Image: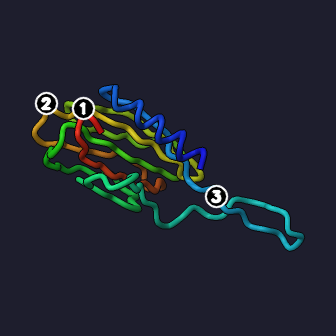
Amino acid sequence: MAQLIRFLVTAAACLVLAGCTTSITASPVPTSESPGGTSTTPAPAPSTLTADPIGSEAIALQLASQRQGYEGEIDRTRDRAKVYVRCVGEGTIGIGIDQVAEYKVPCTADGEGELDSFDVRYVERLRVHVESDSDQLWALTITAVALED
């Protein structure tokens, strides 16, 4: 609960900024247990992964359980876009919204995610691209929100 409150306070602070980043913490990674009841190694990486928005934001694009790059366009319907990203594996994936932002998101063993918020008032369409390796499992959701949200 404290983690949710901390996230919501951070997200509210993001509203003042043109772009900001917040960490989305996933549930702990389950571990395998040996016959004696002690934890041994982390369980295998999930086969499905989502990057779910918080609340009832309007979803403009949602990609789950991806293992290859992506390139596409979406219409801008509001003045701000929130980008939720999660990645399982090693290294980073590249996220880009032409004329708005280009950045890297680290992949982790537990799929911890990131929330970024961008002012998109000055572009009509959002050209989105994701660069990844085939051994990375990633998910991305872009929501459209009012500039004040």
Indicate left or right for 58 with 116 as reference: left
Q: Nearer the viewer, residue 142 or 12?
A: 12
Q: Residue at x 74, y 59 (%)?
A: 41
Q: Residue at x 23, y 49 (%)?
A: 71
Q: Which mark is residue 129?
A: none
Return the disc, 3 or 2, that comes first in the chain's sequence. 3
| Amino acid on which the number 1 mark rests in the picture | Asp
Q: Which mark is residue 122?
A: 2
Observer-side mark, 1 or 3, equals 1
Q: Nearer the viewer, residue 83 or 132?
A: 83
The answer to whether residue 71 is above or below residue 46 is: above
- Is residue 89 at all visible to an observer of this figure? no
Q: Residue at x 42, y 43 (%)?
A: 93
Tag 1 and tag 2, C-beta contact below 8 Å: yes
| Amino acid on which the number 2 mark rests in the picture | Tyr
Task: Name the spot of residue 114 as percent of width and height, x first.
Answer: 45, 42
Q: Residue at x 26, y 41 (%)?
A: 81
Q: Which mark is residue 29?
A: 3
The answer to whether residue 23 is above or below residue 119 is: below
Quadrant the C terminus occupies: top left
Residue identifier under label 1: 119
